Image (cartoon, rainbow, N blue to C red):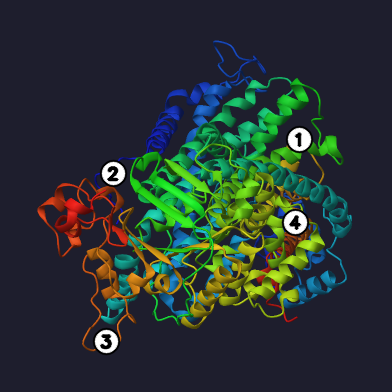
Amino acid sequence: MLAAVVLLTFMIVRWVPGDPARNILGLTAGPAQVAQVRQELGLTNSIWQQFGHYISGLARGDLGRSFVNQQPIAQMIGQRLSLTAELAISALVVVLVIGFPLGILAGWLQHHGRARGFGFGVATGSSLAGALPEYITGTLLIFVFALTLRVLPVQGGPGFTGMALPALAVGLAPAAVFTRLVRNETVSVLSQEYIATAMSKRLPGIRLILRHVLPNVATSTLTLGGLLLVALLGGTVITENVFNISGLGTGIVQAIVHDDYPAVQGILLVLAVIAVVINLSVDITLGLLDPRVLSKRPS
Amino acid sequence: MIARRGRKLPAVLIAGAALLMVMILVAAIAPILWGSKAAALTSDIRLGHSARHLLGTDSLGRDVFYRTLVASRLSMLMALLATALAVAIGLILGAGIVAAGRHARATGGRVIDLLVSYPPIIIALAITAIFSPSRISVVGAIGLAFCPQFARLGNTLAASVSAKDYVTSTRFLGVSRVRLLSRHILPNIAAPILVLASVGFATSTIAISGLSFLGLGVQEPSYDWGSLLAAGLQDLSVNPIEATGPAIAILLTGLGAGLVGDGLARYWEPRLPGISAARAGKRRPRPQPQGTGSPAHDGDNTGRDRTVAEVRDLRVSATGERGGVPLVRGVSLDIGAGEVVGLVGESGSGKSLTAMALARLLPPGLAWSADRLVINGMNLAAPGSPPARLATEVGIVFQDPTSCFNPALRIGTQLTEVLRVHKKVDRKTAASMAVAGLREVRVPAPESRLSQYPHELSGGMRQRAMIAMALLTEPALLIADEPTTALDVTVQADVLRLLHRINTDYGTAILLISHDINVVATLSHRVCVMYGGRVVEEVAVEDLRAGRVQHPYTKALLAAAPDRSAHRVTNPLRPLPGRPPRPGQIGHECSFASRCPLVMAKCRAEAPQLTTHGSGRVACHAVQIPVAVGDEQ
């Protein structure tokens, strides 16, 4: 998987139609300048040499230098990564804090055929919120909380006040999807026979939910929750541009606009690695939560 | 497969389609009617709402309302093209992989899985990075970014369809691969593809607008909703209304297409509310080879005159949309202290529901009523029965030990839970009680079991642990609902012996539910035969074993059960013809009338009542009539 990602990011510059050097410099540049940039891009060498150079650079943690300001790409990514990570994790917190309680409550009520109005509200509310793209949510949040109520800043940044609105913007739609997922899983767990066993113990409702329902719902929602987490990464990229957060998302958009190919390559590679790591960690967490997966290891 | 005649279109489908139609109409006519208005530059820069400019003007004084309307053509056209691209490439790849052969199927499936796990927006960014941003690059980028999802869908669907018999048979008939794909596979998977395509249209509208919003899509002087929204965000502090037009347009399109997808899904696969609730109350008895070893039965227990459970005229019916269908129709039952009462009948006879109603554990969607429902002195017909007493005085053993333990919790946690919650026993004492309980039911190495998870125990061991769990609180009544049905024959006999020992050693009363009359006859003192939600015969076990039964249904049950008669050659098994009635179909007639060999005119007119007959009780006109004068109460 990682090898494929490396290969693809390497190929991006090679696939650019026309001459990448010409794209960078514009039509006014002279042939000498173009030749020099071609040299810097390493486009004069054979494709195998280029690839070898790229790989050996990667091994040293060297992602090349930006065409725009000559800064090392690795350093630029290092600065931007922490903000992106903070936003993605805050958004995940939003998803979990909204999704689990609301979804389990809705599932519980639906299973018992009570409070139909509430269930309908959750169903329609989550359908509507789930269809909200993060850039619209973000714009709306800025309007309400930053410009009208003036309680939170327009500009996103590190810390609670800087992250509150961006995290909500990224997390709201996935939270709605996750709520529905949790609700459906709760309904299906509640009709399992082991819940009948637990019911026969006449446990207090809270204990029944926390002890008997939640672990099973969590296990079964995690697989899709993992996909959701990767989606959060995509939402982060867009939302950073709404709140002007200098993370990887704004970084890649600027890099694309300025034809800064090494920066594009570097950021795409890092985002891809993050996505792979998330998928992997979801698998590992699943293993920890579900004893059936765990016991397959030799003890 | 697609057409479902005679079914109503879901309201969401109609609403979504209407919404989309309006949007499409606007997209078609807006550029023609208002194209010049939308492009007109005025000196009225960043005006708010007014009668002239419904949504104000932008930074160049252009009317935002008209610009939003005009932008709908480009926005929706791009989304349509991107979706078409994603569907076409995705399906050809996904379905093609299946048709190509086994090796391509395996590797292709893995590649698709990898691509799907990657956020489409990042794939789209990578593609936009290669081709400089324009309306064409954005369509290509989003189309390609979404095609893994369609490839996976196409792959799964085609694989599931091609595994079906008719496809295998056409393959044998030498049908070519292309024809196989176009004539046999594609038509069968069209429905889910249409659903995903409408959802895909919604998401690609949003994604394309997103890229334009980032400045990576449509470039000046062209404009779509995304670029309008980006301009609106710039002016948000000065003129907030500017952003509303494009935002609402994106949302309405997304909503309309989403509703269509949702509606189509419901149209083709409508959920049936109420079914699950009715099913939840039913056990699924599996036909198993019978012939359990019979533990010695001494029959006599002391103190049987005190009743542990007393039930009068218990009724259970479904509520909700299938409301009012009676499932249990007036069952009266007594269980004495130390007595084992068997409840036998085919699946759907209401025996499990009777037991669950008795324990006050009916699943939601079912309502019950009873003239009297008393367990060990607790009046359960009155509201507010104490949960702690119910939990400790009634123990329940369910049918399937594999599904009755919570897979995510350790055995110890589950065994000690009632003690800890209701009897406030501390952790250590509860654990040692659980170990003692497990040892009592002969679970080997009981100490180490507490820290194990249910899947680490064998089926028979789990059923023993389940019995131990039910007995830990020393209940007065143990309800065993098909306790042996899911077990192997050898383990069945073990579990029956165990239940028998519990009854004789501790005097625990047992309500034993089974579809297997041999199991019931082995263990019970008294047997109630249920049919169509009623008790049709109540008989002492000695009479049952001797074949002295009255009701034609009980006789049929005995005749259909193996192992009853030693003379199998001269006395072959006689399976009972016909099927038990469905709950909604029972009217005033005897519910067994349609299968009964002794059926008379009276049986079709009125249902017989349960009356004392000989040493037992029976509900049958044919049996009652000859002695009716003297015997009726």
Q: Do we see residue B136 in this rendering? A: yes
Mark closer to the observer (1, 3): 3
Query: In the structure shown, which secondary structural element does the residue marked by tag 4 occupy?
Result: helix
Mark closer to the observer (2, 4): 2
Horizontal relation, residue B469 to residue A62: left or right: left
Residue B392 pos. (x, y %)? 64, 54
| Residue closer to the observer: A290 or A228 | A290
Classify A62 as above or below A67. below
- Residue at numbered disc 3: B568
Question: Which of pointers 1 and 4 lies earlier in the amino acid sequence?
Answer: 1
Classify B14 as above or below B264. above
- Residue at numbered disc 1: A165
Query: In the structure shown, which secondary structural element does the residue marked by tag 2 occupy?
Result: loop
Chain under disc 1: A
Residues tagged by mark 1 and mark 2 found on one chain of the structure: no
- Residue at numbered disc 4: A264
Q: CA distance from mark 2 to mark 4?
A: 52 Å
| Quadrant assignment, res A77 | bottom right
Q: CA distance from mark 1 to mark 3?
A: 79 Å
Chain under disc 3: B
Contact between labelled residues 3 and 1, with CB atoms less than 8 Å apart: no
Contact between labelled residues 4 and 1, with CB atoms less than 8 Å apart: no
Q: CA distance from mark 3 to mark 2?
A: 53 Å
Chain under disc 2: B
Residue B250 pos. (x, y %)? 55, 35
Please, which residue is most extreme toward the bottom here? Answer: B569
Classify B21 as above or below B560. above
Q: CA distance from mark 3 to mark 4?
A: 82 Å
Task: Report the amino acid beneath label 2.
Answer: Arg
Residue depicted at 47% across the width and 76% down the height: B297
Residue A39 pos. (x, y %)? 81, 66
